[in-house]
């Protein structure tokens, strides 16, 4: 595959911001969003008047529920922005769609600085209703899309029922073990212990993991991400504008957003999914090779997804992720490929996609404090799994 021009290379991340991460937070969804966005704007050395684009995912489609309590329209009005372009929608390559759409708007010349944000308040919602956002609730905004109607009659009440099939198939085909899978959760917990914002910071042992109850075999409680309330934001800037800012630009070297199979959780290879499509596309758009990646922030809505992303991005051979993570040394902060250095979503909190980009930039800029990994220039952030997947290859100038 060849392209005359790779438009993402015209765009860089110039600033980042994140609100408190609460379980739950006492702040409103809009307050969390504003906190993150103002921090990101200031971090980029900009003022609100400089922002001429806004992007998020999934936008206003959810009618204000906890999965998407703030959309672009609400934020534009609250911050008094005057934008030339804005967007947000549920479709697309998962939670990183806001970044990809914003980057393309800049590359197309529609705007110069795009504020990308993602806010979630699922912890607050579940304190009131433990079934909030359960698939069995069939809310009009999220769960009435065509494919869920084929799952809920068969008691697929959570995405874990689907992800468990992925894990079981990986165990069967490649000999992956529970002890190997546990290393994703154990690594995330060890990293979260050094992140002041992380939800779960107390130590976890292999015995603790194996003693946790099964939720959907072979996935246990500690294989599931932890709901929280948080807002995360980044500022995307045209590359020349980013170079004029206070931070070394973090270029969008390559994007992966491909989908070459049915948009479905089950009509796919259960050990592959869309992660492999996104990974192949991303590497076709750069001369950088997987061995040059210094950190990987990989989606861990469920721990098996991190394993699949390791393979889908070519960071390890297909079927080898279990053996690669065994013992945890290779994926630790001082290992050959540190992963999910803020604790991921398993222990840090389910910031749902944009948190991975925030952490990748934090590490690339050397701001991670006690959890800082050795200096490096290349990072990958990936989000989604199953039928939707997006990845970003990030390079600090």
Image (tube, rainbow, N blue to C red):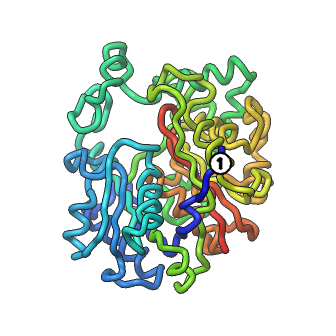
Depth check: 166 or 103 in front?
103
Residue at the limit of the structure toward the front, as seen here = 4
Q: Residue at x 63, y 74 (%)?
A: 365
Depth check: 196 or 55 in front?
55
| Dot 1 crowding, Cα within 10 Å, few <14, some 14–19, many 20+ | few
Image position of 209 with respect to 58: above or below: above
Helix or strand or loop: what does disc 1 sit on? loop
Quadrant hosting residue 86: bottom left
Q: Locate residue 289 relative to residue 61 in the image: left or right.
A: right
Q: In which quarter of the image is the C terminus?
A: bottom right
| Percent x, y of residue 306 | 61, 41
| Percent x, y of residue 288 | 74, 57
Q: Name the residue under label 1.
A: 2
- Residue 370 seen anywhere in this rendered image of the structure: no
Q: Which residue is drawn at 60% across and 48% down?
A: 298
Q: How many labels does the image show?
A: 1
Image position of 235 with respect to 226: above or below: below
Q: Residue at x 45, y 71 (%)?
A: 235
Image position of 378 with respect to 69: above or below: below
Quadrant hosting residue 324: top right
Q: Which residue is drawn at 47% across and 69% down?
A: 236
Depth check: 192 or 381 in front?
381
Q: Locate residue 112 relative to residue 369 in the image: left or right.
A: left
Q: Locate residue 232 relative to residue 49 in the image: left or right.
A: right
Q: Locate residue 105 relative to residue 61 in the image: left or right.
A: right
């Amino acid at each position: 595959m060849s392209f005359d021009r790779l438009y993402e290379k015209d765009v860089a991340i110039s600033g980042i911001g994140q609100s408190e991460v609460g379980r739950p937070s006492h702040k409103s969804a809009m307050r969390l969003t504003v906190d993150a966005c103002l921090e990101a704007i200031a971090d980029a050395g900009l003022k609100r008047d400089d922002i001429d684009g806004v992007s998020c995912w999934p936008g206003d489609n959810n009618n204000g529920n906890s999965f998407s309590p703030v959309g672009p329209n609400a934020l534009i009005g609250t911050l008094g922005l005057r934008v030339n372009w804005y967007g947000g929608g549920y479709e697309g390559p998962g939670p990183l769609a806001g970044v990809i759409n914003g980057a393309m708007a800049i590359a197309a010349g529609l705007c110069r600085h795009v504020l990308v944000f993602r806010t979630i308040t699922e912890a607050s919602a579940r304190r009131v209703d433990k079934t909030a956002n359960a698939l069995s609730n069939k809310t009009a905004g999220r769960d009435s899309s065509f494919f869920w109607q084929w799952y809920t009659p068969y008691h697929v009440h959570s995405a874990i029922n689907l992800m468990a099939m992925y894990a079981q198939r990986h165990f069967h085909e490649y000999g992956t073990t529970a002890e190997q899978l546990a290393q994703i959760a154990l690594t995330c917990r060890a990293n979260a212990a050094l992140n002041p914002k992380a939800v779960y910071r107390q130590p976890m042992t292999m015995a603790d993991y194996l003693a946790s109850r099964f939720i959907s075999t072979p996935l246990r409680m500690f294989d599931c991400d932890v709901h929280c309330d948080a807002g995360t934001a980044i500022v995307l800037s045209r590359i020349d504008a980013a170079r004029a800012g206070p931070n070394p630009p973090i270029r969008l070297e390559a994007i992966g957003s491909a989908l070459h199979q049915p948009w479905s959780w089950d009509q796919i290879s259960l050990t592959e999914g869309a992660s492999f499509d996104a990974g192949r596309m991303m590497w076709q758009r750069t001369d950088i090779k997987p061995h040059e990646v210094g950190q990987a922030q990989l989606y861990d809505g469920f721990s098996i997804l991190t394993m699949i992303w390791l393979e889908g991005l070519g960071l390890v051979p297909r079927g080898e992720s279990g053996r690669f993570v065994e013992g945890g040394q290779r994926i630790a902060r001082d290992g050959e490929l540190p992963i999910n250095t803020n604790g991921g979503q398993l222990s840090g909190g389910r910031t749902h996609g944009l948190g991975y980009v925030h952490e990748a930039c934090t590490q690339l800029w050397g701001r991670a404090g006690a959890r800082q990994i050795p200096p490096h220039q290349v990072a990958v952030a990936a989000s989604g799994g199953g039928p939707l997947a997006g990845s970003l290859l990030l390079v600090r100038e």
